[in-house]
């Protein structure tokens, strides 16, 4: 279902510009859309005569972006939403800026809240507003709680995982877990097994685990997914690598080294909140150099303030203040605490990564085709014949001009 504010395009339309594919940039390319589907992509001088070539433009044509970790935007928060309108407000804030497939993220909360919010988000997936659901918790480390409420964190509970998955109605994509928490990665009927059984991917994050504990969790998750019927992806993920984790130290490598090694082996996809606030550009570039865009999913970790002015917001039970474009928890004494999610759109993250020196096609791949693989979707994530007609038209500075989703222009 396409947002009512979208407008249809003619049955067949030819778009021309610099076309960004997963492997290269076609300096003068064309994308042909027929109805809701891309039917041809290539150099403009090879366009079949059946279609009329428009005049050359300076536009860049990107695939619709795919964000697999997003808590809200436009003043609305997924963890705090109680109505479909609130969910729609947040989703469409990102849609207008080029994110045509969005996974809504919840934060750690009491059991009844998680089940209610998950059911609400499942409705939005089935209405076409969202692409899936991610739970960041509740089986996390109190030591690495970040902007989450440690009072609501629990030991691993496979029964709760199954209840959440039932509320999600097949739309649970990932759940962030700390491998060292009791019941998470103990073997047999643990949280890892319950997630894979439910069609979801374990995502390592908010953890104070040792490198050995994380390596074991990656290996077990990878093996479980390899033998699971209908697994959406062959690889687990890591939730916003570096953030909410024990720091890397040469005598205590911790989770970061294990996640980087797993990604380099092709056994893990690491999320990066590469917005210039959560990570230094040099860190982002190093990860791209080490593991490549096929093992990186750029994410926003956005909260309600994305697209909004500085001010006071909410992220679950936590009060958040955005000042100078950075969201931080408001502590008991009123001072600024831990970073509390992002305020960028995914296109802003792509721009930041490209400015850091990453080739544009690699930055775009990490924000489109790689996260589409996390979702288990083969119909989105690239400008290629047979894919859904999700196209983002941007200027030379990667500022959005027009967004097409499933062949319809977004208002």
Image: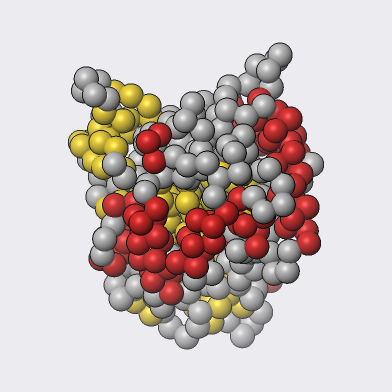
Task: Residue 152 in the image: state x and y as whole percent.
Answer: 39, 41
Left or right, 52 with reference to 123: right
Furthest-top residue in view? 251
> Which residue is located at x 55 percent, y 45 percent?
156
> Which residue is located at x 28 percent, y 57 percent?
81
Rendering quarter of residue 126: bottom left
> Which residue is located at x 26 percent, y 64 percent?
83
Task: Residue 82 in the image: state x and y as whole percent.
Answer: 26, 60
Q: Is residue 252 visible?
A: yes
What colouring does the structure picture have?
secondary structure
Task: Residue 109 in the image: state x and y as whole percent.
Answer: 37, 47
232 is higher (above) or lower (below) than 287 = below
Task: Residue 206 in the image: state x and y as whole percent.
Answer: 52, 35
Q: Nearer the viewer, residue 383 or 176?
A: 176
Q: Nearer the viewer, residue 201 or 369?
A: 201
118 is higher (above) or lower (below) than 387 = above
> Which residue is located at x 65 percent, y 62 percent?
197
How many numbered dots are placed on residues in this image? 0
Q: Nearer the viewer, residue 245 or 350?
A: 245
Q: Split into 4 quadrants, where in the image is the N terminus?
A: bottom left
Q: Split into 4 quadrants, where in the image is the C terminus?
A: bottom left
Q: Is residue 397 visible?
A: no
């Amino acid at each position: 279902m396409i947002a009512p504010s979208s407008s249809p395009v003619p049955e067949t339309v030819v778009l021309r510009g610099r076309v960004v594919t997963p492997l290269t940039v076609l300096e003068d390319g064309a994308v042909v859309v027929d109805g809701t589907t891309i039917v041809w992509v290539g150099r403009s001088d090879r366009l079949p005569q059946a279609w009329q070539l428009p005049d050359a433009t300076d536009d860049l044509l990107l695939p619709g972006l795919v964000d697999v970790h997003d808590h809200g935007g436009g003043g609305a928060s997924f963890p705090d939403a109680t109505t479909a309108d609130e969910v729609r407000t947040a989703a469409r804030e990102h849609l207008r800026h080029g994110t045509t497939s969005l996974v809504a993220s919840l934060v750690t909360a009491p059991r009844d809240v998680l089940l209610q919010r998950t059911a609400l988000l499942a409705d939005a997936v089935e209405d076409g507003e969202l692409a899936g659901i991610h739970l960041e918790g509740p089986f996390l480390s109190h030591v690495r709680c970040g902007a989450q409420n440690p009072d609501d964190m629990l030991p691993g509970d496979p029964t709760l995982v199954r209840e959440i998955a039932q509320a999600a109605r097949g739309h649970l994509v990932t759940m962030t877990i700390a491998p060292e928490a009791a019941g998470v990665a103990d073997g047999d009927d643990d949280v890892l097994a319950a997630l894979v059984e439910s069609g979801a991917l374990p995502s390592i994050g908010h953890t104070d685990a040792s490198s050995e504990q994380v390596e074991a969790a990656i290996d077990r998750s990878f093996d479980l997914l390899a033998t699971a019927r209908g697994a959406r992806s062959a690889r687990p993920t890591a939730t916003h690598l570096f953030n909410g984790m024990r720091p890397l130290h040469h005598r205590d490598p911790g989770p970061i080294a294990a996640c980087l090694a797993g990604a380099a082996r092709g056994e893990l996809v690491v999320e990066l909140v590469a917005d210039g606030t959560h990570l230094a550009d040099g860190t982002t570039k190093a990860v791209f150099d080490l593991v490549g865009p096929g093992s990186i999913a750029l994410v926003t970790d956005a909260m309600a303030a994305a697209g909004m002015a500085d001010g006071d917001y909410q992220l679950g039970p936590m009060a958040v203040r955005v000042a100078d474009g950075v969201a931080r928890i408001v502590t008991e004494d009123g001072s600024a605490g831990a970073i509390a999610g992002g305020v960028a759109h995914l296109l802003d993250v792509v721009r930041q990564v490209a400015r850091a020196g990453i080739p544009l096609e690699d930055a775009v791949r990490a924000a489109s085709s790689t996260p589409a693989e996390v979702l288990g979707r083969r119909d989105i994530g690239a400008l290629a014949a047979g894919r859904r007609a999700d196209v983002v038209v941007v200027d030379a500075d990667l500022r959005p001009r027009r967004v097409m989703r499933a062949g319809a222009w977004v208002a």
